[in-house]
């Protein structure tokens, strides 16, 4: 079945460091891909999305490119801030999952000043 | 436009008690979902609904019931609470049709069963 695998956390970085959180997927057909963010004590918010190969989603300085050849959707940011500390979830929506969201386990990001 | 709201925000139950969590959305979405999130873990789908009057089981439905009598509301019930149901519960909604089927989330209900 469809699945999403994320790198395990926590990931701890210093402010202004470069961030990569890996996400790979298995799905039938052409899934849509998402990154959601959950700040401490809050619900999940959509951070960015991509619906077809080579699409790049971007928001708040974060980017992720839909790579069909490597079935990946890695999240990147050039210079992280303390306020980026949160849990990041990769997810997909595909025909094989009846268009429900299939979630990764989440990656906790800790940014130290 | 409030989006997705959840009531209550916090609740403490004793084992065996019952309660209902309410989710409301004002985006006229067809699909609604209930998830639970345990500490340090991702989301697990409990039940979902693809329209008024319809519900379906998700990954972890046991011990929960749901109802969708009105399009904008989705209720999650616990008939006899157990400590294993201590969790944070999130409601979400989405609109079918064209991809990407993104879901919009409420702020969560933190439930503790003692």
Image: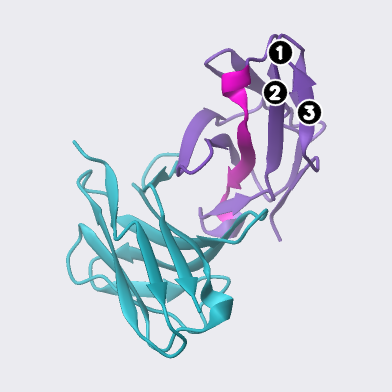
Chain colours: A purple, B cyan
Mark found first going from the N terminus, 2 or 3: 3
**Callout 1 and callout 3 share a chain:** yes
Where is residue B6 drawn, in percent x and y? 30, 55
Image quadrant assignment for residue B91: bottom left
Where is residue B21 drawn, in percent x and y? 32, 68
> Magenta stretch?
A82-95
Image quadrant assignment for residue B42: bottom right
Say above or below: B60 vs A43. Answer: below
Mark found first going from the N terminus, 1 or 2: 1
Q: Are marks 1 and 2 in contact (CB under 8 Å)?
A: yes
Please give the chain letter of the residue carrying mark 3: A
Residue designated by label 3: A12
Residue A56 shows up from this direction: no
Residue designated by label 1: A15
**Callout 1 and callout 2 share a chain:** yes
Distance (Cα) linking label 1 and label 3: 10 Å
Residue designated by label 2: A111
Where is residue B73 drawn, in percent x and y? 22, 62
Where is residue A43 drawn, in percent x and y? 45, 44
Residue in front for this viewpoint, B85 or A95: B85
Residue at image position (60%, 61%) is B38
Say above or below: B106 vs B18. Answer: above
SS state under label 2: strand
Please give the chain letter of the residue carrying mark 1: A
Image quadrant assignment for residue B23: bottom left
């Amino acid at each position: 079945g469809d699945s999403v695998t994320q790198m395990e956390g926590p990931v701890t970085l210093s402010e202004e460091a470069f961030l990569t959180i890996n996400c790979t997927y298995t799905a039938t057909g052409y899934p849509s891909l998402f990154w959601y963010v959950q700040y401490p004590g809050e619900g999940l918010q959509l951070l960015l999305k991509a619906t077809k190969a080579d699409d790049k989603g971007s928001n708040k300085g974060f980017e992720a490119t839909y790579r069909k050849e490597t079935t990946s959707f890695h999240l990147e940011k050039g210079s992280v801030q303390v306020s980026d500390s949160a849990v990041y979830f990769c997810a997909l929506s595909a025909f094989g999952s009846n268009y429900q969201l299939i979630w990764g386990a989440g990656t906790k990001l800790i940014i130290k000043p | 436009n409030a989006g997705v709201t959840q009531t209550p925000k916090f609740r403490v139950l004793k084992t065996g008690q019952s309660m209902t969590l309410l989710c409301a959305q004002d985006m006229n979405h067809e699909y609604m979902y209930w998830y639970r999130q345990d500490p340090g873990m991702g989301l697990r789908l409990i039940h979902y609904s693809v329209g008024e009057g319809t519900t379906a089981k998700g990954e972890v439905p046991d011990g929960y019931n749901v109802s969708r009598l009105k399009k904008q509301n989705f209720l999650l019930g616990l008939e006899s609470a157990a400590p294993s149901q201590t969790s944070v519960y999130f409601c979400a909604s989405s609109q079918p049709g064209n991809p990407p089927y993104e879901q919009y989330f409420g702020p969560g209900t933190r439930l503790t069963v003692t």
